[in-house]
Image (cartoon, rainbow, N blue to C red):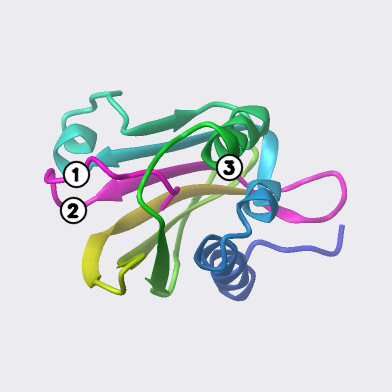
Amino acid sequence: MNAVIDTASALALNAHCARCIDNDELEAWTQFFTEHCLYRVTTADNHAQGMEASLIYADSRAMLNDRVLSLRTANVYEKQRYRHLVGLPSLLEDTPRGRRSETPFVVVRIMRGGETSLFATGRYLDELVIDGGDTLRLASRVVVCDSHNIDTLLAIPL
């Protein structure tokens, strides 16, 4: 096994994920997750209380792919895009499968008409793993938003 879970590889993974979302390459974004993964968007209050309520929830890459497909073909929402500013990851404890990390983020939303606003701040709580193909992937990403005031137009993943 040549791949390692270190700060540089976690930083690169986060940069690639953010780039795919910001450039509307959501189909490529899902490939950074393991087949059996967890992706949740929640608030800091819910997370602190251990509540499972999620604004977005997927427990497999197939569910993430379905969400992207529905964004492309079925969902109706105002055209928008994001620009991520992602901080340095803090590598935390090892897990049986890999390693946990925490990374701060800021997301700016740009609407079709050009209006730009601070959309979300928070942290990514990740479980990073190296898959059988020697590739670093996300086994779990819990997006914890700092504010409980979340715009109802949370269409695109954070």
Q: Residue at x 58, y 42 (%)?
A: 72
From mark 3 to mark 1, how far is it between C-alphas?
29 Å
What residue does disc 2 label?
146
Q: Residue 108: x, y in percent? A: 30, 69
Q: Residues within 10 Å of mark 2 (few under 14, many from 20)?
A: some
Residue 113, image x, y percentages: 31, 69
Q: Residue 123 location in percent, x, y?
A: 32, 57
Q: Give the Cα distance between marks 2 and 3.
A: 28 Å
Sequence-earlier tag: 1 or 2 = 1
**Label drawn at residue 44:** 1
Q: Which mark is residue 72?
A: 3
Secondary structure of the residue carrying numbered label 2: loop
State the residue at coordinates (31%, 74%): 114
Tell me: residue 1, above or below residue 49.
below
Q: Amino acid at mark 3?
A: Arg
Residue type (three-letter) at the residue carrying disc 1? Ala
* 75 vs 29, nearest the viewer: 75
* Magenta residues (range): 129-158
Q: Residues within 10 Å of mark 3 (few under 14, many from 20)?
A: few
Cβ atoms at labels 1 and 2 below 8 Å apart: yes
